[in-house]
Image (cartoon, grey):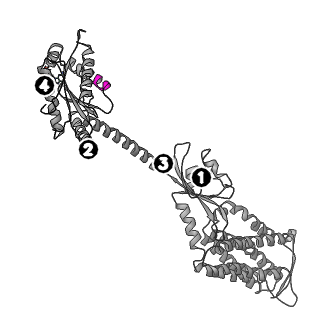
Amino acid sequence: MRPPSGTYMTALSVMIAWWCAGQWASFLWNDLDYRLLVAKLQYLAIATVPILWFSVALTFSGYGRFLQRWYPVLWLMPVATIALAFSNQYHLQVWSRFTIAPDSLALEIEYGPWFSTHVTYSYSAVTIATLMLALKIGFTRGRRLQFMAVILSPLIVIAVNAPYILGIDLLPFDPTPSGFAVACLILLFALRQHMFATLPVAREYTLEKLNDGIVVIDDHGLIADSNPAARQIFGVELMRIGRHFSEALPAGISLNADVSTEVQLPDRRWLDIRISRLQSIDGPTRGQVALIRDVTREKGLQASLLQSQKELEALNSKLNNLAHTDELTGLANRRSLYERVRSEWSRSTRHKKPLSMILIDFDNFKLINDNYGHQVGDQVLQRASGIVRQIIRPEDLAARHGGEELAILLPDTNAKDAVDIAQRLGAALEALQYHDEAGQAFVVTVSSGVASRCPNDKSPDMMIARADKALYQSKADGRNRVTLADAVNG
Ligand SMILES: Nc1nc2c(ncn2[C@@H]2O[C@H](COP(=O)(O)OP(=O)(O)OP(=O)(O)O)[C@@H](O)[C@H]2O)c(=O)[nH]1
């Protein structure tokens, strides 16, 4: 775990104070051994202050994850410098000559080869840190004062330190720690202004705690950063920095910017991925950020909702069928017949088109039931209904009118054609052979009454009544025949 930014700031302040204290302590006693010891102790700060400065800057710039990875490596150089400073008398790597000027308190130091390595490393750390902060704040609106503070603070350090290490003695002591102290105060001032503390820390905190995955992708599609939620969704290995983001997705998935895409992983989880381009204030696109939501649960709910909806629709249509169909024969039931009769009636009167109705009644059906049983009677009704359905046109309607009586509604059909159809139906039904339970064959005949809409019919019921009367007439005339109703009075 990396320490929080506040800890870096405290450590930086303590080390600068240590450096300054050493500075003043060295004047207390103008003895070479004493001043050498103080100088060595000061190296505890000289070596660490630039890296602490770097750490503060990186944390506030939002690059905390980088620090987390590379922190031990960053400290190798400062540790080496401190070790070399304390053992300098054996190798003269940090300084080769260390004397006190004859007529002043100033030290005359000739630096060894390691010192330039240390200076290069320290200057690089401070420069990189400054650039990071400047970039961060430079692109944040309304932060001009803070931007100036960030640039100014390291410049102060460089302005006082560079002449000193180049041997230009402006003061009789090293002004670098004082320079760092002033620079640190300026940084602290900036922090007190809530400058870059709140914003990046809040952003980083939000990203860390967010339930949705966030993956930052560079211009080449490589992962630059990811939050814990993304690493949990895809696994740490697939989210490794520098890996191609497409490796985390099933093959062939293409994601378009600013459009949500639902993607199913091989382990059946569903993700909703939305890619947004990262646009900096100065214009150019700088990679992309992917927002990833695990929507497996929602998908499951959606699927079961769809399934329930389908089942409900199937049930509805079944209920609807049941409400309009006769259970035994599969023909339309009486209610459905009358609904259709009413609509066809108004259509035929509006368009002055013929409309006919046939009522068919099985002859002596009671005898069938009595002789062969009720079940055989049912089978007769079922088979005969099937034949009727086959013979009529799709636009006609066959219905069970009740008991062993069927009704056929014939739109756009005149009386003559209706009689023809009734006769064909009668012949087809008579041609059917039924068998009783003992296998003995028998036939059934039907009687029919036909009526066509005529001007005297004030309602469909009047037409149906005339068809019924004609049917009664067929029965009275000896059955197995078709009677056309009289147009006037049935
Ligand atoms: N098996 C069976 N019989 C039915 C059904 N509906 C009505 N029936 C029978 O059909 C018979 C009708 O008898 P009736 O009205 O006397 O007429 P019929 O015997 O057909 O004689 P006619 O109509 O005068 O030729 C009755 O025995 C009813 O029980 C049914 O759904 N299944």
Mark 2 or 1, nearer chain start? 1
Which residue position holds label 1?
255
Q: Secondary structure at mark 2?
A: helix
Camera-near label (4 vs 3) is 4
> Amino acid type of disc 2?
Arg
Q: Residues within 10 Å of mark 2 (few under 14, many from 20)?
A: few
Q: Which mark is residue 472?
A: 4
Q: Nearer the viewer, residue 194 or 364?
A: 364
Which residue position holds label 3?
296
Mark 3 or 2, nearer chain start? 3
Percent coordinates x, y for residue 12 in the rendering: 67, 75
Q: Is residue 362 above or below residue 25?
A: above
Q: Evaluate whether residue 240 shows in this view.
A: yes
- Residue, x 81% and y 88% (percent of image)? 172
Ligand 1 sits in which quadrant? top left
The answer to whether the residue labelled 4 contacts the one labelled 3, judged by CB atoms less than 8 Å apart, is: no
> Amino acid type of disc 3?
Thr
